[in-house]
Every structure is written in C-alpha cells, then in structure tokens.
C-alpha cells in the first residue's frame, strides 16, 4: 500500500508540471488510475480478506508504476512551450469539429448483444454482450477522449495534432485494421474507394458511408464482423460491405446489394415494445417501429450469397449465407441509430444450420454528449468486452467439440477473393530474400522479359 501511495505522489509531481503544458494528458492519467482503483475495489468487495486480493494489488502497483514511468519519459521528451501546446489543443478542437460537421452522420456507440443459435446437425446456442461503434467514413478525430478514428497520413501540423489527440482515446478505430492489409496512409475513406474500384463499382454512386465495427481498447480487439453501410446522394441505403474475420487471422469482404423488394416486416406496430431478450424486436422484426412509419420496405436490406470462406471449424465451406439487415438511420439518414442484423447459414441442401444476430440493447450513445463522470462509468462497464470475445469463441468451440461431438473441418487454404493471415517474422525475412533474388536475376538477365512481382499487402510495395 505504501508503494502505491508513493507512486501516486511521484506521478502527481509530474502531473503538476504537465498541467502547464497539456491538461488533457493529466486527465488521461487520472482515468488510468480510476480504472485501476475500480478494479481493486471490485476484488475487495468479493474477497473475504486482503490476502486473497494480493495478486490484484501486485498488478495494480505494476500498472501505477508503469504509468509513472510513462509520465517521466513523456516529460523528458516534451520540449514544447506552453504557447505551442495551447495552439495544439485549439487546433485539435477546431479541426475535429469542422470534420464532424462535414458529415451527415456522427460517431456513435452502440451497446449491443449477439445471439448464436445452431440448428443443425445438433442444437446449441449462446448469447453475449457486445460493443460496437459507428464512424462516418471520412471523419477522423477524437470525441471526449472516449472514441477516435484515424484518417489519412499526417501532412500538416494540425493533422499531427489530431493524431496526438487520438492516441489518448479509450476506444479507437484504425484504418489499418480494415479492408486490405495496412493503412497505406489512405484512411478509411481512401481504402474504401480502392475497394469499391476493385469490385468494379463507381465510388461516386455512394456519397455517404458509415462503418459499424468493434473498436480497439488499449490497442487490442478481435473483430469477427464489421458492417459498411453505403448510401446514395439521396441518402438511401444501396449496399453493405460485410467484412468477416476468422480466428486464423484471415479475412473476406462481401460486397452486397439490396435484393429485398417487398420488405421483411408487415406489422411495424408490433415492434413498438422491446422483447424479453432486451433487444428492439425479435430476429424476424426490425429494430424499432418509428423507423418504418413512412416506408417499410426501404428500411429493409436483404441479400443471399454462396459461402466461400472458412469461419468455423464445425462448418464446411459449402452452403450459403443470407443477411437480413435494417438501415440504422432510416429514413434518409435521419434516424437515431439502431443496429439489428441477422445472418443465416444454410447447408448446400438448404438446411438452416446457424442463425447469428446482433442487435442494440439500448439507444445509441453520442460520445460528445457525455460528461467526464459518464465517460468513466462507460469505460468501467465496457472495457472488458473486447478482451473476452476470443475466449468466448474458444469456450463455445470446446462445448461443441467435447459435449456435442461435432465433426471438425480443418482449415482449407484461402481462395483468391479472401485475404490470408499476416506474415510471421521469418516469412517476412524469407520474402525479402526472395525479392532480392528475383531482382538480381532480372537486372543481370540478357533477355527482355517483363516480370511483375506482387508481394503481400502488409509487407510493402510490389
């Protein structure tokens, strides 16, 4: 306990110095300590003696000392004057607000729940809480130190300031984690344009785009699926990009256009109340009734396509998917934002094997509207969700294998439309040697033979 108090006062001295240069940095450190104290308090409440909390206290002290070390290193490397840092904070707020106003939609947080129900060959189901965030594609900045998204490469002082601000956000969305591997300095918007062109689509047809995904927390996230909603100039949902990641670090993007002409819901008034599972409606009904007062069919998005990506070891690569999604901002991008998507996996013989649904459990949250205390409460309630996504998958896989005795399909090689896993350190070294070998032979060859070498996306240029 004495070490903890001493470390706190040491940090406080550096906070006093930093307070003259960067007040937001002090707030960030206070949040770190608050989370640590909440963690300690939680264990203390459930423990009968202090001795049973010893491992937690050791971890807490380590966290405090590491934060203190961060303060020291940062202060030693901080050569900025007070006026320069004040200019940085002002430019950050101005640029962030201007960027947000240039979009019809704004960044939001979606507290959700996901349900998986396996129907065939054996029944099995589970339900977990899940956290999603929404980012208007093209927006970058930070909102209340709670949520941030990166943009294009920093080319000006103001953009470097924004990048500095983003590093202090709790939840982050980074362009390098989406679509093709690597960021390439393009940001989410630039990468989306390249992907649309690769699908022979005209980016000009999609004037607005909105990404709903699981954010990073402390640099980590396991993101099974992300939804890119693409809207026309008339603010109508025209297409969805379904970005799927498996546990083998492989990825597949599906570009889907709406094939539902009649709508899925014929009784919108019956969705006015929440169902027992806490979501807005049930898997066959849309997210909320008010969204459908004008035009029911326009809020419905449906598409069916062949399965060609290995997601679960308990399913083969055969069969088909059906996505039933609802426009979260209907009508005409004016809705409050509600997530309600259902994906159905059918076998090659037409048997429904698996139904997966993700839906909002409460109204969407505007990060900029939260007070400091509300942000802290939100982080304390949701910080752990991203860390347990992968362990939850492993747990359910163990149940299917040991209890249900389901057949295991070994991972096949990815097809050309999918993206393989990231390379290892050894593979990166071997690739460079192979690249040099090819270059040497081409440069020393007497034959004029064109040779195009395409490397892995995340390794470097061709």
Image (tube, rainbow, N blue to C red):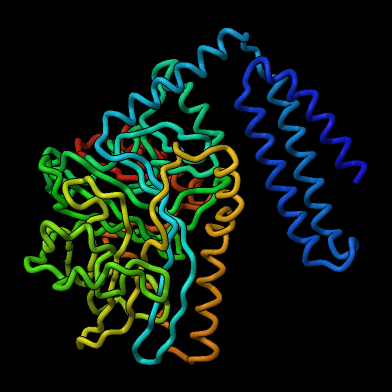
| Residue 349: x %, y % from top left | 20, 88
In which image quadrant can residue 100 be found? top left
At a point 33% along the width and 65% down the height, the residue shown is 414
| Residue 285 falls left or right of residue 128 | left
On the question of residue 257 being in view, the answer is no
> Is 351 placed above or below 451 here?
below
| Residue 208 falls left or right of residue 33 | left
| Residue 286 falls left or right of residue 405 | left
In which image quadrant can residue 173 be found? top left
Residues 48 and 11: in front is 48
| Residue 204: x %, y % from top left | 12, 38
User: Which quarter of the figure is the C terminus placed in?
Assistant: top left
Looking at the image, the residue that sits furthest to the left is: 261
At a point 56% along the width and 68% down the height, the residue shown is 391
In which image quadrant can residue 440 be found? top left
> Is 375 placed above or below 167 here?
below
> Is 165 placed above or below 146 here?
above
Residues 134 and 278: in front is 278
At a point 40% along the width and 90% down the height, the residue shown is 123
Residues 224 and 432: in front is 224
| Residue 438: x %, y % from top left | 36, 42
């Amino acid at each position: 306990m004495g070490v903890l108090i001493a470390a706190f006062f040491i940090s406080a001295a550096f906070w006093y110095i930093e307070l003259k240069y960067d007040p937001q940095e002090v707030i960030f450190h206070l949040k770190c300590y608050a989370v640590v104290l909440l963690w300690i308090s939680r264990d203390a409440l459930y423990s009968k003696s202090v001795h049973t909390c010893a491992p937690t206290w050791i971890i807490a002290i380590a966290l405090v000392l590491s934060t203190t070390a961060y303060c020291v290193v940062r202060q030693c490397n901080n050569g900025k004057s007070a006026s320069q840092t004040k200019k940085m904070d002002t430019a950050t707020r101005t640029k962030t607000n201007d960027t947000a106003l240039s979009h019809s939609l704004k960044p939001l947080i979606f507290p959700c729940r996901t349900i998986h129900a396996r129907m065939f060959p054996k029944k099995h189901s589970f339900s977990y809480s899940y956290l999603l965030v929404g980012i208007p594609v093209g927006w970058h900045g930070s909102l209340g130190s709670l949520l941030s998204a990166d943009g294009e490469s920093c080319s000006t002082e103001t953009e470097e300031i924004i990048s500095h601000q983003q590093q202090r956000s709790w939840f982050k969305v980074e362009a390098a984690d989406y679509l093709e591997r690597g960021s390439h300095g393009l940001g989410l918007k630039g990468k989306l344009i390249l992907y649309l062109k690769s699908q022979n689509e005209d980016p000009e047809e999609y004037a607005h785009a909105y990404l709903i995904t699981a954010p990073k927390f402390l640099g980590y996230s396991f993101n099974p699926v992300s939804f890119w909603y693409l809207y026309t100039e008339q603010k109508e949902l025209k297409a969805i990009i379904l970005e799927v990641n498996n546990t083998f670090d492989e990825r597949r993007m599906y570009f889907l256009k709406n094939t539902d002409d009649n709508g899925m819901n014929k009784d919108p008034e019956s969705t006015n109340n929440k169902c027992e599972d806490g979501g807005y409606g049930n898997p066959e009904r849309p997210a909320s009734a008010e969204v459908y007062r004008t035009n029911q069919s326009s809020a419905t998005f449906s598409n069916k396509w062949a399965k060609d990506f290995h997601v679960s070891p308990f399913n083969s690569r055969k069969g088909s998917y059906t996505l039933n999604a609802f426009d979260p901002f209907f009508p005409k991008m004016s809705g409050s934002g509600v997530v309600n998507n259902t994906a159905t996996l059918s076998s090659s013989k037409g048997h429904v094997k698996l139904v997966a649904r993700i839906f909002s459990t409460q109204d969407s949250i505007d990060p900029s509207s939260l007070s400091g205390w509300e942000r802290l409460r939100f982080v304390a309630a949701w910080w752990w969700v991203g860390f347990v996504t992968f362990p939850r998958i492993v747990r359910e896989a163990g149940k299917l294998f040991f209890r249900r005795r389901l057949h295991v399909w070994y991972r096949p090689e990815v097809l050309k439309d999918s993206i393989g896993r990231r390379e290892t350190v050894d593979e990166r070294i071997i690739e460079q040697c192979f690249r040099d070998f090819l270059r040497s032979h081409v440069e020393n060859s007497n034959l004029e033979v064109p040779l195009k070498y395409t490397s892995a996306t995340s390794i470097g240029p061709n």
